[in-house]
Image (spheres, rainbow, N blue to C red):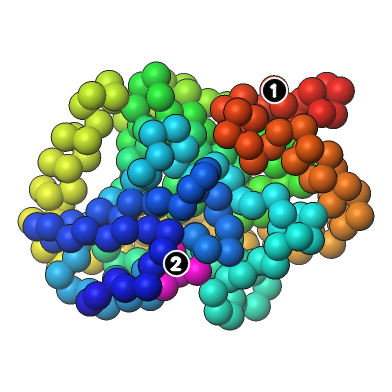
Amino acid sequence: MTYENLSAIGVDIQQGVATVTIDSPPLNLLDGKLIPDLRRFAAEVRHDDTVQVIVFQSADPEFFIAHGDMHFLTGQAPIDAGGDVPPGTNAVQAVNEEIRSLPQVTIGKLAGLARGGGNEFLMALDMRFAAIGKSGQAQPETLMGIYPAGGGTQYMPSLIGRSRALELILGGELVDAELAERYGLINRALPADELDDFVTTLARRIASVGPTIIGIVKTAVDAADYTKRDLALESSFVSRLSVEDVAALAHKLLAAGVQSREGELRLEEVLREAQGA
């Protein structure tokens, strides 16, 4: 496998572990460049028997994936999925499900901020580990006049339960590593200087188990999952939103500093200020 023509991600394979580095300046937005790259990678790695574990990380020390590109909402950028998506789903759901269904074990290494579609992507992975004092996760879509429709309403309850999912989705709070661990949003919160070594050691240990055992364990564990995802239902609620209202608010939020580096570092505050909350 060559993993060529991927401009938003880099792929390095060692000892059965593919390290995928998201590198799409200025903010690692989930946009018409990153989404197709992730889908192309998923389609290729699915058949790569040299890879048993995939670790996703970011080249940006402050942002893992900031969130979905708000220009999708204003109509200034088409939602390029990099190909067809299953009926009843959208581009973000498609990439998340393609990553979620990979036969390899997937791990997220979080040392920055992941909001909206970025956090939905993390939740689609098999495991997540975060750096104390550096990481943050949020679903701020409700503060943008929309809702998490990239799998967020389906993935989050299975990780942290209904009441906590409602709290984080409707409250739009930025969650640090310690609270994320306590709620079950991540596997472990680790000191920032220990994160790399921990994830590398774990990934190589899992890779050494081999594809047969990995496949059996993933299949058996998934069969024991009593939750049922309904992505088509999640997507169907989009029709209840006013396209004009959503676009108008998106323009207002972009003007207030959303998708600027300064604005993204205090995104929840910017969103509430723009809406007078």
Magenta stretch, residue numbers:
36-40
Q: Residue at x 72, y 46 (%)?
A: 147
Provide the residue designation for mark 2. Answer: 37
Q: What x and y, as percent, mark residue 175?
A: 53, 26
Drawn side of residue 56 relative to residue 97, left or right: left
The answer to whether mark 2 and mark 1 are in CB contact below 8 A is no
Q: What x and y, as percent, mark residue 111?
A: 37, 33
Q: Quadrant of the N terminus?
A: bottom left
Magenta span: predominant SS is helix
Q: Residues within 10 Å of mark 1 (few under 14, many from 20)?
A: few
Q: Residues within 10 Å of mark 2 (few under 14, many from 20)?
A: many
Q: Could you tell me which secondary element the residue under label 1 belongs to?
A: helix
Q: Residue at x 62, y 25 (%)?
A: 266
Q: Residue at x 58, y 58 (%)?
A: 31
Q: Could you tell me which secondary element the residue under label 2 belongs to?
A: helix
Callout 2 amino acid: Asp
Q: What x and y, as percent, mark residue 214?
A: 20, 61
Q: Quadrant of the C terminus?
A: top right
Q: Quadrant of residue 188?
A: top left
Q: Earlier in the sequence, mark 2 or mark 1?
A: 2
Callout 1 amino acid: Glu
Q: What x and y, as percent, mark residue 227?
A: 51, 53
Provide the residue designation for mark 1. Answer: 269
User: In the image shown, does 232 or 139 lie closer to the viewer?
Assistant: 139
Is residue 111 on the magenta stretch? no
